[in-house]
Image (tube, rainbow, N blue to C red):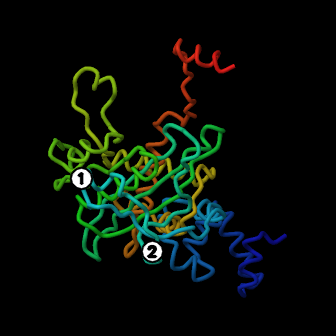
Amino acid sequence: SLTSHERHVFELGATLEAINWYRRKRHTDAYDDWRMGCEFPSDPTEAFQSTGRRAHNPEYVSAMRRYVRDPIAKGDMSADAPHGKEAIDGSLRFVPSAEGPLWIWAHPDRSTAMSRRYIVSMDIGGRTPGADWSVISVIDRYWLAEGGVEECIATCRFHLDQDLAVWKAVQIAKYYCDALLVVEANSLDDKGTEGDHSLTILDEIKGYYTNLYSRTDPQRIREGAPERYGFFTSSASKSDLVNQMNKRLRENGYIEHDARALDEADTYEIKTDGSYGAVDGEHDDIYMSRAIALKASQTTPPPAMILPRKNTQPHDTLLTEASF
């Protein structure tokens, strides 16, 4: 009558008496295997990775690891300039490098004309080695048109000045067929509060790259309100992001190839004050970049095939008839 988890701990050396105690404890306190592992760990993994306040059930995260695989390419984007017009002109290209920060599981598909297919998101970090990472995520929404889910196909993780970091995101968005670019805006604001971002980096790049995520309600824009670019993360919106990620992890609601993203989900926790963040000594930058990308996808219309325009000009019809 041993469950799979009971067989696991028995193979580790637990006695039947100890397993029986686990059963009675679990029944008395209504604990599941996850909570039992947090409170009464049976192996080093449970002892050192379970905090008791994990934001996501590790069983959900573990199930997602079925999609993990090595990237098909590593490298970085390169152009004639690191910012401005020449950063995204014809000189822009992907340069393979074993040590490159950009890991790719799928290059952009230029054989299929589709609108709203790719989304590129960014969680901005610092420039020093000890700072948070800046992370850029690329998701492919192709299968949404067929009733499927999004697929994360690229991760870029690095330390760089904020302005150059955002331009790198622009380059990756340009590479992925002019993808919708979603940048966490409040990381650009020194005070960390909502305010006038008219002089921020996002307002600088909009003159060169126009497919930017706007958090301003379309109706307000029509009424004359200024557009506010980027994704603003507040305590409320962060809770919404975590709830969304929990649902996606529970239901296999997207495809994740990068093991580092799932490692961060495994060490993401609810703090004692009720806030969310990585456990001490770990990072959550890939996790947040993914959460922002998937939330933006949730609020963006599904992708659609772009059909070639039919030529209906009268003189073209005459030429067609004459050719026969």
Q: Secondary structure at mark 1?
A: loop
Q: Nearer the viewer, residue 234 or 119?
A: 119
Residue pictured at 58% horizontal, 13% vertical:
318
In the rendered image, the residue lying farthest to the right is 1
Left or right: residue 202 versus residue 270 is left
Residue 180: which quarter of the image? top left
Counting from the top left corner in percent of width and height, residue 160 is at 27, 67
Mark 1 is surrounded, within 10 Å at the Cα level, by few (under 14), some (14 to 19) or many (20 or more) other residues, namely some
Q: Which residue is mark 1?
A: 84
Image position of 22 (left or right of 94): right
> Which sits in the foreground, 226 or 277?
226
Above or below 222: residue 289 = below
Q: Quadrant of the C terminus?
A: top right
Amino acid bearing label 2: Ser
Quarter placement of the N terminus: bottom right
Instruction: Residue at 61%, 53% (x, y): give it.
Output: 250
Q: Which residue is mark 2?
A: 97
Where is residue 197 drawn, in percent x and y?
Answer: 18, 44
